[in-house]
């Protein structure tokens, strides 16, 4: 990367003066700008972009102006001028579309999605990224496909979906196999490390950061090398191994001092000071803090100024200089309030930008309604809607299959007992029949056979075994009937059903998980038949009951109550389990949510359950008391109950 950049800069310097104002120079400037896509030198990118736009407008060079606008949007992203960046990217996309440059349009979509990610407008950014990804995959452009995966990894990391972040960064590495832009592989390795660290897989995280470090060194990328060193040191600090952390932070500092990364240099100084404070070495900490504070104030980096004063306070307290420590503590508190207020104002500004983006998109959509292209778009939207509905159905079905899968172990155990008894009885009966055949051969007449004492005894065994087989088969039939009732294979999509029958089926299928440990209490009210999709409602019952069983670590009780309140049907499932923390309860129905404790391990199960109940016009209420248990209440609306009645 560095070699190619140097060659292009040399080519630009050595360009014949007669070509100074030609399209050839614009193309070379764009080639140089492409090498700065990673953002390692944003100031140089701004210089290149300004020259591209100025020269392209003089020459009326459409390609140069369209791509110049794209790079200006990228430059705005680097300096956090998001509103201007969005305007430039939209204008670039329009110009590229007019030129028929489909790859350019896809790149504009991806850049816009990244700017929207930067302002926290994730619900708008995510579809744009996936649309760009699909376009690059269609065209076979592996490099930009990998860039999309990397951007998705950053987005998922910001919304704390670390598993998806890990997967997207891994896809970046896979797609980049054999391509020359190895800096992107190194960054993706860094992203994998961050995701693994957030998933508490610290050793695997360190392995990936070390791989990232080695690759950055191999391609002579000092900025990336310093970042990797800093990340490794931070993980060691997180693990409490300050002795190992310190050398990595010092090496990172040396590189950042050499390349003049002032703010990053301040970060390294603060990390080193933090290690010295933790090692009870205040004098060394204060020496580093003097340097860090000077840089932070020079670069006007308030978060760094806050960290510096906070660490000053801790170091001086260790020295016993409580008055000076208090003074720095007050300063840190004051700066913290300023940072909070500025971040709040910045967040409001970003929300305003997001609102303006949505407003502009809505206005553009209204304008498109007057366009002939509306028919084609409507057809596409219908197709996408159909795919979305199919995906939602698949999600519900996959969660149902997951629920059934959890039952398999219990059902095998339940059915093995009667099957074992049946097989044993059949074996005994088989031996009795063989013995009767032997007696028949030995006897000269029927009378002699019937008068034999052994004959009566053998027939008694056969009769007893027949009864054992009958009881075993009846038990197996009951298990299968409960499963059939749960799945409702014979039901239409919408049917009038007995809610209690579905609850009883789900409870029966969970019997093996509850026996000798959990008591299930039924407090059923008087309910009318309810019009619903029975297999989906049964799936909700199974999901909530399974969560209740998993929340009870030893012995406990699950109470299932049904009632009518103001015409609405209510199904409450209460348990005496561990309960749910308030902060977790607020995220309970988020996509892919799970906790580290014994409760709520169903992945998407709660979200799917909520979607099913909402599809039926209802909602789910949650009450929980940590250490005492939880209650999930399904409420189906009055109108549906009345219609069913």
Image (cartoon, rainbow, N blue to C red):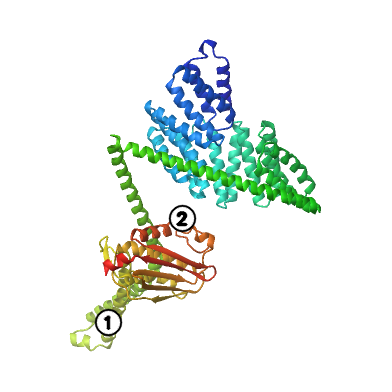
Disc 2 and disc 1 in contact, CB within 8 angstroms:
no
Q: Callout 2: helix, strand or loop? A: loop
Measured in 3D between alpha carbons, the distance from the residue under mark 2 to the one under mark 1, in whole angstroms, is 59 Å
Considering every residue shown, the one lying at the far right of the view is: 320
Q: Is residue 245 visible?
A: no
Q: Is residue 445 above or below residue 194?
A: below
Q: Quadrant of the N terminus?
A: top right
Which residue corresponds to the image point at 42% horizontal and 70% vertical from the top-left? 573
Q: Percent x, y for residue 26?
A: 49, 20
Q: Is residue 62 visible?
A: yes
Reading the image, the residue beneath label 1 is 463
Reading the image, the residue beneath label 2 is 590
- Is 553 in front, or is 71? 71
Q: Percent x, y for residue 345?
A: 57, 45
| Residue 418 falls in image quadrant | bottom left
Q: Percent x, y for residue 638?
A: 32, 67
Point out the tag, 2 or 1, that comes first from the N-terminus.
1
Is 4 left, or right, of 507 in this rendering? right
Q: Percent x, y for residue 211?
A: 58, 40
Discs 2/1, front: 2
| Residue 634 falls in image quadrant | bottom left
Which residue corresponds to the image point at 19% horizontal and 88% vertical from the top-left? 447
- Is 438 in front, or is 360? 360
């Amino acid at each position: 990367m560095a070699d190619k950049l140097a060659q292009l800069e040399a080519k630009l310097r050595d360009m014949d003066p007669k070509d100074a104002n030609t399209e050839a120079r614009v193309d070379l400037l764009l080639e140089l700008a492409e090498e700065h896509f990673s953002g390692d030198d944003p100031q140089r990118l701004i210089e290149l972009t300004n020259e591209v736009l100025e020269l392209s407008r003089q020459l009326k060079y459409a390609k140069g102006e369209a791509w110049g606008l794209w790079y200006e949007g990228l430059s705005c992203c680097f300096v956090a001028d998001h509103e201007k960046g969005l305007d430039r990217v939209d204008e670039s996309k329009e110009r590229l579309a007019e030129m028929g440059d489909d790859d350019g349009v896809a790149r504009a979509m991806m850049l816009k999605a990244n700017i929207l990610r930067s302002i926290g407008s994730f619900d708008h950014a995510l579809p744009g990224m996936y649309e760009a990804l699909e376009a690059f995959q269609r065209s076979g452009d592996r490099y930009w496909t990998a860039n999309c995966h990397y951007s998705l990894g950053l987005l998922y990391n910001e919304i704390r979906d670390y598993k998806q972040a890990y997967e997207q960064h891994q896809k970046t590495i896979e797609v980049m196999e054999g391509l020359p832009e190895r800096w992107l592989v190194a960054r993706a390795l860094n992203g994998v490390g961050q995701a693994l660290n957030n998933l508490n897989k610290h050793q695997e995280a360190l392995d990936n950061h070390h791989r990232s470090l080695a690759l950055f060194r191999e391609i002579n990328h000092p900025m990336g090398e310093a970042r990797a060193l800093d990340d490794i040191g931070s993980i060691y600090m997180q693990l409490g191994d300050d002795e190992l952390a310190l050398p990595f932070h010092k090496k990172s500092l040396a590189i950042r001092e050499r390349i003049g990364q002032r703010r990053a240099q301040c970060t390294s100084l603060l990390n080193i000071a933090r290690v010295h404070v933790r090692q009870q070495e205040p004098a060394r900490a204060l020496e580093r803090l003097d340097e860090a504070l000077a840089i932070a104030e020079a670069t006007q980096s308030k978060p760094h100024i806050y960290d510096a004063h906070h660490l000053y306070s801790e170091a001086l307290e260790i020295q016993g200089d409580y008055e000076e420590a208090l003074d720095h503590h007050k300063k840190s508190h004051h700066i913290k309030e300023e940072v909070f207020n500025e971040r709040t104002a910045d967040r409001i500004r970003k929300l305003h930008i997001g609102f303006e983006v949505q407003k502009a998109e809505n206005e553009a959509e209204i304008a498109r309604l007057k366009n002939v292209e509306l028919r084609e778009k409507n057809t596409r939207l219908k197709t996408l809607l159909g795919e979305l509905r199919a995906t939602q159905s698949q999600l519900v079905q996959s969660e149902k299959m997951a629920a059934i899968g959890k039952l398999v172990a219990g059902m095998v155990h339940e059915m093995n007992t009667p099957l074992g008894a049946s097989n044993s009885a059949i074996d005994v009966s088989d031996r009795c029949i063989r013995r009767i055949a032997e007696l028949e051969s030995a006897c000269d007449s029927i009378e002699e056979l019937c008068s034999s004492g052994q004959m009566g005894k053998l027939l008694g065994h056969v009769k007893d075994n027949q009864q054992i087989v009958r009881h075993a088969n009846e038990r197996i039939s009951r298990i299968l009937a409960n499963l059939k009732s749960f799945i409702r294979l014979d039901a239409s999509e919408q049917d009038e059903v007995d809610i209690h029958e579905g609850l009883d089926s789900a409870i029966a299928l969970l019997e093996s998980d509850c026996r000798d440990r959990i008591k299930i209490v039924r407090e059923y009210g008087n309910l009318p038949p309810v019009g619903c999709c029975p297999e989906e409602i049964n799936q909700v019952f199974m999901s909530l009951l399974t969560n209740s069983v998993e929340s009870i670590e030893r012995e406990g009780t699950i109470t299932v109550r049904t009632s009518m309140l103001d015409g609405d049907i209510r199904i409450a499932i209460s348990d005496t389990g561990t309960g749910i923390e308030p902060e977790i309860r607020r995220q309970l129905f988020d996509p892919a949510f799970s906790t580290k404790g014994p409760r709520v391990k169903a992945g998407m199960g709660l979200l799917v359950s909520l979607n099913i109940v909402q599809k039926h016009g209802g909602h789910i209420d949650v009450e929980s008391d940590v250490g005492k248990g939880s209650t999930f209440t399904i409420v189906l609306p009055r109108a549906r109950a009345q219609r069913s009645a």
